[in-house]
Amino acid sequence: MSEPAQHHAINYIEFTTTDIAGSKAFYEKAFSWNFQDYGPDYIAFDKDHAGIDGGFRKGDPLQQSPSDTQPLIVLYSQDLKATQDAIIAAGGSITVPTFDFPGGKRFHFSDGQGNVLAVWSE
């Protein structure tokens, strides 16, 4: 996420995997993706090789609800609080409050139609 991102555009996609090393090896071998390691439970890939920035988080689909294991689409916001307020005003709800992560802050929201997405900012 090094380039300036477009406000409210899809900027990142996050997948769940039971095996970080196995996912990394598969996508490196099959598609020549490059990865950045962020500890034992997270790896990120870049849009230069994958077409969009994204990552894999460790999780167990058998122990989590489907919404916790489906790919997570992440939007970028220049103003996280204003975007959160707009989501609530439009009838959405915050499902994961704002938290810090390497590179910025983000929160997750539901659009009220069964979709959960995230929004991040520096």
Image: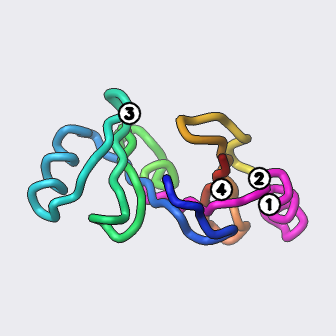
The x and y percentages for residue 83 are: 80, 60
Q: Amino acid at mark 3?
A: Tyr
Pointer 3 local density, CA inside 10 Å: few below 14, some 14–19, many at least 20: few
Distance between the alpha carbons at the discs numbered 1 and 3: 27 Å
Outermost residue toward the right in this view: 89
Q: In this image, 117 relative to 69: left or right? A: right
* Circle nearer the N terminus (1, 3): 3
Residue 5: % across, % down? 59, 64
Given contact means CB atoms under 8 Å apart, are the residues at marks 4 and 3 in contact? no
Cβ–Cβ under 8 Å for marks 2 and 4? yes
Look at 35% across and 70% down and name the residue there. 51
Q: Which residues are magenta?
A: 70-92
C-alpha span from label 2 to label 4: 7 Å
Q: Is residue 92 above or below residue 24?
A: below
Left or right: 77 as drawn, with respect to 65? right
Do the residues under discs 1 and 2 have CB atoms within 8 angstroms?
Answer: yes
Q: Which residue is mark 3?
A: 38
Q: Are marks 1 and 4 in contact (CB under 8 Å)?
A: yes
The earlier-in-sequence mark between 3 and 2 is 3
Alpha-carbon distance for marks 1 and 2?
5 Å
Task: Name the kind of residue labelled 2 in the image.
Answer: Leu
Considering depth in this image, is 74 or 71 the residue closer to the camera?
74
How far separated are the C-alphas under marks 1 and 4? 8 Å
Image-quadrant location for residue 9: bottom right
Residue displayed at 70% across by 60% down: 77
CB within 8 Å, label 1 to label 3: no
* Residue carrying label 1: 83
Residue type highlighted by circle 1: Thr
